[in-house]
Image: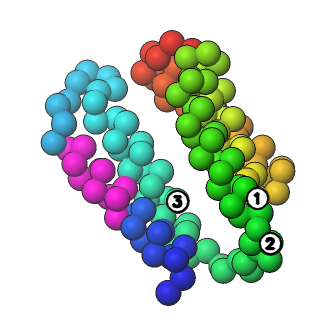
């Protein structure tokens, strides 16, 4: 079994657990505290199923560059809390998603599409739906 498939199954299981646990949260008129765990759970289930059934990729041949990519991703995630109050939730999400996808080996166009999609999703959920200041 490939590690990606195992991660996919674990992510889908975690997403289903988030969904199940969200039913125990209090309900409110409009979006309540159960909304975020359900959105996160849905994203985890979909991403996990994608990973579980994805065709295997060829492993990259440059093992020396993987350490640099991991270090850059770690640095980016450590800087994210400092960027959030300065540029806002949607741009921070887009920057993190796009850069993370690119450093993970995705093509530039796919990384930009990932950044745009997740930036718009974060804007819709947090700014429009939950009223978090942009």
Point out the image quarter for the C terminus: top right
Separation of marks 2 and 3 at Cα, in angstroms: 26 Å
On the image, the x and y values in percent for residue 65 come to 77, 63
What residue sits 52% from the left and 59% below the top? 47
What residue sits 24% from the left and 43% below the top? 22
Residue 114 in sight here: no
Closer to viewer: mark 1 or mark 3: 1
* Residue 80 as seen in the image, left or right of residue 56: left
Q: Which of marks 1 and 3 is nearer the N terminus?
A: 3
Asked if labels 2 and 1 touch by Cβ distance under 8 angstroms, the answer is no
Residue on which the image places disc 1:
106
Residue 86 against residue 102 in the figure, above or below: above
Q: Earlier in the sequence, mark 1 or mark 2?
A: 2
Q: Quadrant of residue 80?
A: top right
In the drawing, what numbered circle is on residue 62? 2
Q: Which of marks 2 and 3 is nearer the N terminus?
A: 3
């Amino acid at each position: 079994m490939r590690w990606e498939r195992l991660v996919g199954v674990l992510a889908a299981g975690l997403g289903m657990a988030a969904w199940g646990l969200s039913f125990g949260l209090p309900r409110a008129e409009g979006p309540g505290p159960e909304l975020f765990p359900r959105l996160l759970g849905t994203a985890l289930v979909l991403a996990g199923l994608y990973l579980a059934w994805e065709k295997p990729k060829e492993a990259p041949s440059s093992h020396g560059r993987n350490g640099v990519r991991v270090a850059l991703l770690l640095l980016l995630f450590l800087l994210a809390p400092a960027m959030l109050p300065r540029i806002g939730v949607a741009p921070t999400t887009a920057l993190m998603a796009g850069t993370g996808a690119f450093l993970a080996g995705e093509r530039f166009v796919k990384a930009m599409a990932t950044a745009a999609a997740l930036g718009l999703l974060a804007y819709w959920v947090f700014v429009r739906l939950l009223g978090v200041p942009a």
